[in-house]
Amino acid sequence: MAEVLDASFDSFGASRLMYGSDWPLSQLGAGVLAWRGYVQDALASVSSDDRDAILGANAARLFRLDPR
């Protein structure tokens, strides 16, 4: 997974990446909670600003969601 994340950062930067649960397909493997854990582990070395952007801030900005 690290190779994919590195290539994604190199190609797009953190401001253009968004987390996706892949539900319901993730249920075919270890499940959505395990997938979220894998993503958290993969993003552990990323800055908190980039991690926050990927895990929700980018989606909120793109879909113009009210932060309240």
Image: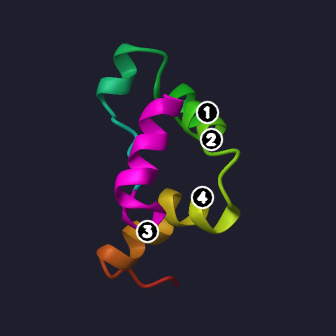
Label whose residue precedes the other's in the sequence (3 or 2): 3
Q: Which residue is mark 3?
A: 15
In this orientation, does residue 12 appear?
A: yes
Q: Does residue 15 lie above or below 22 as drawn? A: below
Give whichever of discs 4 and 1 has the lower sequence position: 1
Q: Which residue is mark 2?
A: 40
* Three-letter code, disc 1: Gly
- Which numbered disc flags the more N-terminal residue, 3 or 4? 3
- Report the residue marked by disc 1: 37
Left or right: 47, with 54 as reference point: right
- Label 4 SS: helix
Question: Which one is closest to the eye, mark 3 or mark 2?
Answer: 3
Local crowd size for mark 1, using a 10 Å CA cut-off: few (<14), some (14–19), many (≥20):
few
Res 58 quadrant in image: bottom left
Q: Find residue 61 and report its horizontal and vertical position in percent.
A: 38, 78
Q: Nearer the viewer, residue 47 or 58?
A: 47
**In 3D space, how far apart are the residues under numbered discs 3 and 2 (Cα atoms)?**
17 Å
Upstream in sequence: badge 4 or badge 2? 2
Does the image show residue 19? no
**Dots 3, 1 in contact, CB < 8 A:** no
Q: CA distance from mark 3 to mark 1?
A: 21 Å
Q: Nearer the viewer, mark 3 or mark 1?
A: 3
Q: Specify few, some or many for label 3: CA neighbours under 10 Å numbering under 14, 14-19, or 20 or more.
A: some
Q: Are marks 2 and 1 in contact (CB under 8 Å)?
A: yes
Question: Does residue 62 show up magenta in the picture?
Answer: no
Question: Tag 3: residue type?
Answer: Ser
> CA–CA distance between discs 4 and 2?
9 Å
At 39% across and 57% down in the image, what residue appears? 17
Q: Position of residue 33 (x, y in %)?
A: 55, 31
Give the residue type at disc 4.
Arg
